Image (cartoon, coloured by chain):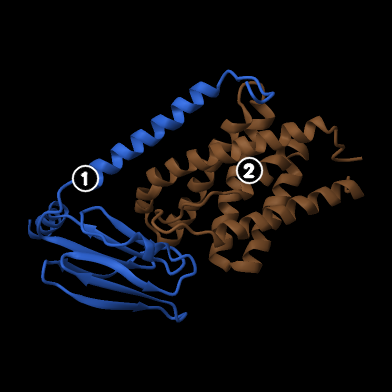
Amino acid sequence: MFNTRRMAVIAVFVALATVLNIVERSVLVPGLPPGVKPGLANVMTLLSILTLGFRDAFFIVAVRCFMGALIAGNPVSFLFSFTGGVFSTLVMVVMWRYFNKVVSIVKISMVGAVCHNLGQLFIAALLVRSWQVYVFLPVLMLSAVITGYIVGVLTRQLYLSLNQRNLRWTD
Amino acid sequence: MRAGEPVKKLDCYLTIVLLALILVSLAALYLLQGRPAGENLTVEIYKNGRLYRSMLLAENSAGEIKISDSEGHYNLVELKEGKVRIKEADCPNQVCVSTGWLSKPGQISVCAPNKLKVIVIGPSEWTDRVDTITY
């Protein structure tokens, strides 16, 4: 199962996701509400679901969160990105596997982004022990729909252009 | 279509659902926080889910409270001119600091890493509570 080609592709995906994660963390736009991020690393998550399958996608998300926490983060930010990442990946995997015929890649990305924020607010609510943190939901959801759309379009174009090249992802 | 992906069946319904969710949550937020600032606001600071301190948010109240915990982390809460904010914190993401000033009932500022919550409570909730104690 873990042949060389597959391992190399996973390594490239993890590296790209980690770099995107660090880049978007360092580009903070002042004036934006708290917690609003572009979520560019989601491009790699979604692309790995489309090309490699759900097992590798979960693996890539977990390793990316771990790498991000090692390089620029701390235990709490790991908890946040891990919960959000795993929950949104789960939802996107289900959508791609079972609703592929009726839902486009862009919509999968948008729903995934919203789920990412839901997962993060869930952890925040657990930590602070108060469901009132969900007052941040409207703003976060609005931003998730916008960034999810951008990420979705990016991923779709990447996927289509990679498909035209007839790449073999695994042996 | 520019891209080679056809329009799928559920797409437009999903768009509607997402937009409806945003509108509903915005409306709920407006109902929760849209009331005028009003008098007799109370600030409550919760640490680890327990009430740490509660005080009146008066026009002339001013001051700073430092909430530290056993692990050495801290948040600095500032009161000024009927507003309250988390001025400083040693948490990594600084979400609580960038939330800014709170002055309306229902507004909250949260520091998840330090498990701290600051919330402004309106006069109605406050009098409700007094009534339950009195009667």
Where residue A104 sits in the image (x, y, percent)?
62, 27
**Which quarter of the figure has residue A127?**
bottom left
Front residue of A23/B127: it is A23
Q: Which residue is mark 2?
A: A89
Looking at the image, is mark 2 or mark 1 nearer the viewer?
1
Q: Is residue A49 left or right of residue B73?
A: right
Q: Are marks 2 and 1 on the same chain?
A: no
Q: Which residue is mark 1?
A: B34
Where is residue A49 drawn, in percent x and y?
71, 39
Which colour represents chain A?
brown
Label 1 marks a residue whose chain is: B
* Residue B31 % position (x, y): 23, 41
Q: Amino acid at mark 2?
A: Thr
Which chain can be seen in blue?
B
- The answer for which chain carries disc 2 is A
Dot 1 alpha-carbon crowd within 10 angstroms: few under 14, some 14 to 19, many 20 or more = some
Tag 1, which secondary structure?
loop
**Residue B127 picture location, percent across and down:** 10, 56
Asked if residue A48 lies left or right of residue B98, the reply is right
Q: Residue at x 42, y 62 (%)?
A: B95
